[in-house]
């Protein structure tokens, strides 16, 4: 796999393709970042972008993880003392999950976001950003239905973080797209370059396949989960024998979250996936790539229950080191 394919593997979107190809031509020493509000425990959304960071490290990028304590404070996630303690625990979990500590720089937002130069640049960006534009950018990531002034400032700070962290590539889930487009539009107004951006997919709701999996509602998978928790959640997951389920009677689009987790979480981390089956049911199935597993599910060769059993095993292997950090 060449550098561009590795960098863009499982990305939903890159902005722009030419910019990412230029980075891929010379990835050594380039810097990429993802920002996370310290929230206690890594869940499957954190893990998906972390998988992308692991790809980027393999491609030669330096990786910056912003543990966004100021953002978390603005989003009503606790006191600074509580948030910073949480950030330290999350750092340990990211390393346990597989980030190369020697290639990863962990930064607290408060290390630079309270400096005078940052504040002055922030005010300059505020002059270039309407309240409605900031609110639209925040729509997918705010923690409540109401929008405070602090939350309107939040996405403008995210734009400025890209400059102050001196990164070449900004990574986020698709819910971060509006924030990144705000950054591309507004940063030139303070004589900074528009950032190159990459967006990772969103995993569908585990129980229904509708919408996105969320840690604030419904069922999600996190490093707090025991082996039994993972088994129960995966066994209860929506998994029709297809990668393209029919919409609901109400017209809601559906995805197959079991297949999504195989594609975006398991295959990027394991060279081969083995689905164990008794000999009377045809014996084990071995897959070197996601496409072959999907094809077997579509054809009926792979039963959804057998796919779920394998997914439970591989997810547990990915999560176990972080679980030990939490319980240790």
Image (spheres, rainbow, N blue to C red):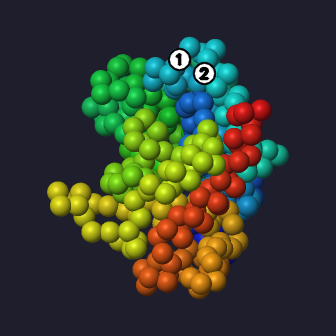
Q: Is residue 102 left or right of residue 64?
A: right
> In what element is the residue under mark 1?
loop
Give the vertical position of 272 relative to 69 (above or below): below
Q: Residue at x 65, y 28 (%)?
A: 87
Q: Residues within 10 Å of mark 1 (few under 14, many from 20)?
A: some
Q: Are marks 2 and 1 in contact (CB under 8 Å)?
A: yes
114 relative to 92 in the view: left or right? left
**Residue found 77% across the figure and 32% down from its top:** 328
The residue singled out by tag 2 in the image is 83
Circle 1 residue = 78
Residue drawn at x 65%, y 22% is: 84
In this rendered view, identify the residue nearer to me: 49 or 20.
49
Q: Residue at x 64, y 49 (%)?
A: 227
Horizontally, is 166 left or right of 199 in the view? right
The answer to whether one can see residue 268 in this image is: yes
Q: Nearer the viewer, residue 254 or 13?
A: 254
Q: Is residue 266 left or right of residue 271?
A: left
Instruction: Specify whether residue 106 is in view.
Output: no
């Amino acid at each position: 796999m060449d550098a561009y394919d590795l960098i863009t593997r499982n990305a939903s979107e890159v902005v722009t393709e030419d910019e990412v190809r230029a980075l891929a031509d010379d990835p050594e020493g380039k810097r990429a970042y993802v920002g996370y509000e310290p929230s206690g425990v890594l869940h499957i959304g954190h893990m998906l972008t972390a998988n992308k960071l692991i790809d980027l490290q393999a491609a030669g990028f330096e990786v910056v993880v912003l543990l966004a304590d100021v953002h978390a404070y603005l989003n009503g996630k606790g006191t600074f003392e509580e948030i910073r303690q949480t950030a330290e625990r999350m750092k340990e979990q990211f390393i346990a999950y597989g980030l190369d500590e020697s290639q990863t720089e962990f930064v607290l937002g408060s290390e630079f976001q309270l400096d005078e130069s940052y504040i002055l640049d922030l005010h300059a960006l505020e002059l270039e950003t309407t309240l409605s534009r900031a609110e639209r950018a925040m729509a997918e990531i705010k923690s409540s239905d109401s929008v405070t002034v602090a939350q309107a400032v939040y996405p403008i700070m995210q734009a400025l973080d890209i400059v102050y962290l001196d990164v070449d590539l900004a990574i986020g889930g698709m819910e971060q797209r509006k924030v990144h487009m705000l950054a591309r539009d507004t940063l030139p107004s303070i004589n900074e370059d528009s950032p190159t951006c990459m967006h990772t997919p969103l995993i569908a709701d585990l129980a229904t396949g509708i919408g996105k999996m969320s840690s604030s509602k419904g069922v999600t998978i996190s490093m707090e989960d025991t082996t039994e928790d993972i088994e129960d959640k995966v066994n209860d997951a929506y998994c029709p024998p297809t990668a393209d389920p029919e919409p609901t009677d109400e017209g809601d689009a559906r995805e197959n979250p079991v297949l999504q987790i195989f594609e975006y979480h398991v295959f990027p981390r394991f060279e081969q996936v083995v689905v164990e089956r008794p000999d009377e049911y045809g014996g084990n199935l071995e897959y070197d790539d996601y496409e072959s597993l999907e094809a077997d599910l579509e054809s009926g060769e792979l039963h959804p229950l057998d796919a779920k059993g394998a997914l439970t095993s591989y997810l547990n292997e990915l999560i176990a080191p972080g679980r030990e950090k939490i319980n240790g």
